[in-house]
Image: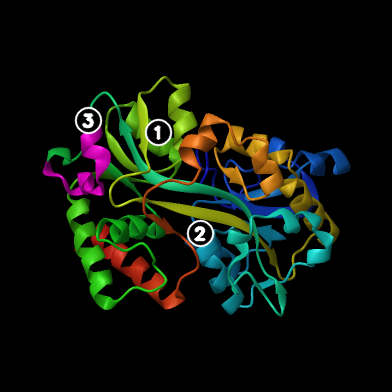
Amino acid sequence: MALVLAAPSLSPALAADPELTVFDWAGFEEPVIYQKYIDKHGQGPTFAFYGDDDEAYQKIASGFRADVAHPCSQMVSKYRDAGLIEPWDESRIPAVADIDPRFLDSEVFRDDQGLWYIPADFGSTAVAYNTETVPEEDVSTLQIFVNPAYQGRTSLPDSADDVWALGYLATGVTDWTDVSDEQFQAAADWLRKAHQNVAVYWADPAEEAQLMASGAVDVAWSWNDVLPLLEAEGYPIGFQRTATEGSSTFFCGFVNLKNGPGSEDKAYDFINAWLDPGSAIGLLDTIGYGLTNTKGLETVANDPRVVHGLAEIDAPVLAQVPNDPEQRERQLIEFEKIKAGY
C-alpha cells in the first residue's frame, strides 16, 4: 500500500544500516515514520520492497532473508503456519500497551506462546470518485461498480483481499470470517459483473491516482491514501465510505522473521521508533494512514484526513481481519479466474 510508485522488488531503497533489513511496501521507507531509529543509529535500516502481501510471503517462503516484514493482518496466520516467524518479546516494546485493543483482538496475533504480530498502521477502502463527473447519488451504493453507465470507467485494486471485501459488501456480507458457499458464490457472481466495467486493475495508489487524474477512470475501489495524492494535484476527489452497503477497513503491522541476518536489538529499536506517538503525523503526511498507538492517533485526531478517511462511520463495515486460510486461498484462485474473464 505505497504512496509512491512501487520500487523494484527486493532492491534496497538506499545505502543504509546493514544490520537491519526491513521487507516492506514502497513508501514506508520515509524517515519521518521511524525518526527515533535514525536519531539513535545515525541512519535508517536497509529496505527491500514488495508489491503485495502474497508476493512478499512467497519470497520469504522461498528463502529471501530479512529481519522484519510488514504484512497486513489476514496474512499473519500464513506466516505462522509456515514457521517463518517467531514471537516478539513484548517486554521490549512498551508502546504495545498503547495499541488500540481492537487491533490485537485475535489469537492469531497473541496467544499463550507470545505476541506474534504488532499492528502498526490502519486505513480504509471505499469509493473514490471524480466529483465533477460522478453524481453523489451514484456513489450512494456500491452497485455503481456494476452500473452499465460506468462501463470502462471503473478501476479495482489488483488485490484479492480488497476486491473480495467489495464483493461481499455489495452482496450483503460484512463478516468474512463466516462465509457460506452460497455467499461466496453470490460475491463471485457480482464481481464477474463488476469486471465488465473495469478499465484496469490498479497495482498501487500512484497508478490509481494517475488513472483518475488522466480521466481514464472516474470511479475506483480505493485505499484512503490516494486522497492526499489527488488533492495535491487539485483533482476533484470524493471518497464515499458510507454507501448503503458500507465500506472496508484494513490494518497492517510487523512480524519478527526467524533467523534474520541482522541485529535483533535494532529490530526492537525500529519497532519502538515506529510506534512512538510522534510518528503519527509522519505516517499521516507520507502515507495517509493512522497509527495504531492511541496516544499517537490522538495527536492528529482532528486532522481532516483522519476525520474523512479513518474515523468511525455510521454505515456497515467489513473489517479485513484474519480469516480462514483455505477460504482466502479459494478467493485468490477465483479472483484470478475473474480477472481472466472466466
Q: Residue 210 sits in which quadrant?
A: top left
Q: Secondary structure at mark 1?
A: helix
CA gap, disc 1 and disc 2? 21 Å
> Residue at left 23%, top 26%?
133
Amino acid tagged 3: Pro
Boundaries of the magenta span: 136-148
Residue on which disc 1 sits: 209
Residue in view at x 21 percent, y 67 percent: 186
Magenta span includes 240: no
- Give whichever of discs 1 and 2 has the lower sequence position: 2
Vertical position of residue 167 compared to residue 133: above or below: below
Give the residue at mark 2. 53
Q: Nearer the viewer, residue 306 or 114?
A: 306
* Residue 205 % position (x, y): 44, 40
Q: Residues within 10 Å of mark 3 (few under 14, many from 20)?
A: few
Image coords of residue 194 (percent x, y): 21, 52
The image quarter in which residue 182 lies: bottom left
Identify the residue shown where x is 26% and y is 23%: 132
Q: Nearer the viewer, mark 3 or mark 2?
A: 3
The answer to which of marks 3 and 2 sits earlier in the sequence is: 2
Q: Residues within 10 Å of mark 2 (few under 14, many from 20)?
A: some
- Residue at mark 3: 135
Is residue 298 or residue 144 the one in the foreground? 298
